[in-house]
Image: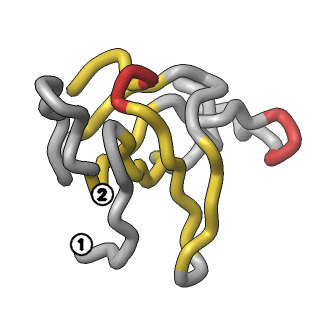
């Protein structure tokens, strides 16, 4: 995926995974009760800080905090811009 957004510093752009629409037991979750996803795919990375290169790269599946990042819409798609420190793990 080629995204024309270039984050600066230690920021990354993440495309959130779709919200769960059904429980494991098969019950549908209404849109008003769906939880904000905490998993997504990194689509763009910044250059990092001096002496602190980024450890994530485009294409990585990551877990991040529930309230991490700033939501943006670009070309009709929703993304999150967050600092690498808001990412908890690479899957």
Colour theme? secondary structure
Residue located farthest toward the front when viewing the structure as drawn: 50
Q: Which quadrant would the C terminus be assigned to in this image?
A: top left
x and y percentages locating residue 86 in the rendered image:
45, 23
Check disc 2 and report its element: helix, strand or loop.
Answer: strand
Return the disc, 2 or 1, that comes first in the chain's sequence: 1
Name the mark on residue 18.
none
Is 32 located above or below residue 58 in the figure?
A: above
Place residue 57 in its image quadrant. top left
Q: Is residue 59 above or below residue 76?
A: above
Q: Name which quarter of the figure residue 36 lies in.
A: top right
Q: Which residue is mark 2?
A: 43
**23 or 61: nearer the eye?**
61
Q: Residues within 10 Å of mark 1 (few under 14, many from 20)?
A: few
Distance from label 2 to label 1 (Cα)? 7 Å
Asked if one can make out residue 89 in the rendered structure from this viewpoint, the answer is yes
Q: Hey, which quadrant is residue 48 in on the image?
A: top left
In the picture as drawn, the residue positioned furthest to the top comes out as 88
Quarter of the N terminus within the rendering: bottom left
The residue at the point 57 percent across, 37 percent down is 69
Residue 47 is left or right of residue 39, and the answer is left
Per the rendering, the mark at residue 1 is 1
């Amino acid at each position: 995926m080629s995204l024309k957004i270039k984050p600066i510093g230690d920021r990354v752009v993440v495309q959130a995974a779709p919200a769960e629409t059904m429980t494991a037991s098969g019950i549908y979750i209404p849109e008003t009760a769906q939880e904000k996803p905490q998993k997504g795919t990194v689509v763009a990375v910044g250059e990092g800080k001096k002496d602190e290169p980024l450890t994530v790269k485009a294409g990585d599946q990551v877990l991040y905090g529930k309230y991490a990042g700033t939501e943006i819409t670009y070309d009709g798609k929703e993304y999150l811009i967050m600092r690498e420190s808001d990412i908890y793990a690479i899957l």
